Amino acid sequence: MTRKAKARLLWAGLFLSVLGLAAVWFLSQNREAELQTFAMGSYVRQTVWGPGGKAAMEAASQAVADLENRISWRREDGDIAQVNRQAGQRPVPVEPETLALLEQMRQLSEASGGAFDVTIGPVAQLWDFDSGPHLPEAGELEAALALVGYDRLLTGGDALFELASVPQELFDGDAAALEQAAALLDPGMALDLGAVGKGAACDAALAQYQEAGVKGAVIAVGGSIGLYGQKPDGKAFRVSVRDPEGQGSLGVLELPGGYVSTSGSYEKYFEQNREKYHHILDPRTGYPAESGLVSVTVWCPPEMDWKWPGALSDGLATACFVLGLEDGQKLLEGYGAEGIFVDGDGAVAVTPGLEGRFSLTAPGYHREAGAP
Ligand code: ADP
Ligand code: MG
């Protein structure tokens, strides 16, 4: 072989190696991984793109499980169960993350005029939608309603001074614990984060995706979805919105990221005396909300400056379901969030920020202009 030919061969080999390395790099950047687990009474489905995807999904699963332990009122050692157990007695120091979530959910309770109420526990437990759904008696419902009121949830330093018994050993010389406490003012009161847990789980997962530095990811926890980063094809995320009357899809949302949550009366209900009772309750009456809506989907865009935007989208969906179209739209506007409202007659109203991002595909529905 001549020297020239040898050199040419060397160059060709080098070129092919670089090409190969580039291909391997490209594939790893766009590698897709999936995982399905179970938490918060729902399937958790994750898809992640980019290197480190598998580890990121496992970390996210763990973060969701930890969150559930902290915020479910059923987990006896968790923050929320402890605050409930000590209602009317003493403040309880909680994790900073729990405190931030509680404070934001109290703020949402206030902004929604109590249509969403983070202290709905006593009423929700009476209906017992998860274990033994039944129609409560009017008397017990009234007694439970008297124990609902987000303004009787205290957090931070305030929690200490309103209650009689403050365990000094907990707080003596510990200023941090003092600022990290939560308390319910009356015995029998109970926090219930059931309406926002799945959205909060999406927040917890996205924090893990960010830490792992993956390229893009989607997590779905029941009716809540978190969208992170970029898909390999650079296109918008496509999110299917469930048809509230059937099993299929109402339509498709195309979104750049953020959080999507749906609350619908079709999700959990029972029938008694030929009446249908669903699990989204009106804290003003104690009975299932009757706003004429059958489902509300809320999108919190990615650029929002909120610590728990996933939980917010979930809570807003519940609040809007209770409030109905007009007041619901106003609430969303105040937060810079967007929504899709579906009523029992098949009318679908979409807020301005979702115009052009939502296509209605299910037959039997019609678009309706939102309130001006
Ligand atoms: P899921 O996704 O489990 O169906 P939702 O997000 O639709 O839950 O919220 C329903 C749950 O939220 C109920 O089971 C109850 O625990 C709680 N809840 C119901 N109504 C309200 C309300 N108005 N405010 C706050 N929480 C509520
Ligand atoms: Mg909800």
Image (cartoon, rainbow, N blue to C red):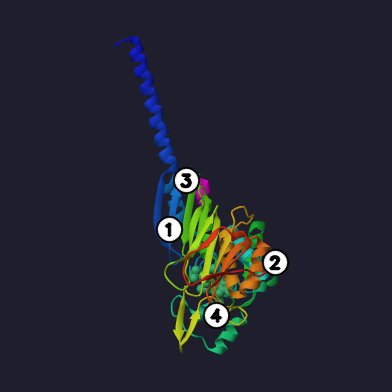
Q: Which residues are magenta?
A: 208-212
User: In this figure, which residue is indicated by the disc labeled 2?
Assistant: 158
First reached walking from the N terminus: tag 1 or tag 4: 1
Label 1 within 8 A of ligand 1 by Cβ: no
Q: Give how far apart the Cα atoms at labels 1 and 4 are.
A: 29 Å
Residue 70 drawn at (x, y percent): 52, 63
Task: Say what amino acid the circle numbered 2 marks.
Answer: Asp
Q: Give how far apart the Cα atoms at labels 1 and 2 are.
A: 40 Å
User: In this figure, which residue is indicated by the disc labeled 1?
Assistant: 45
Residue 185 occupies which quadrant of the picture? bottom right
Ligand 2 lies in quarter: bottom right
Query: Residue 288: which disc?
Result: 4
Q: Give how far apart the Cα atoms at labels 3 and 4 are.
A: 43 Å
User: Secondary structure under badge 2?
Assistant: helix
Task: Say what amino acid the circle numbered 3 marks.
Answer: Asp
First reached walking from the N terminus: tag 3 or tag 4: 3
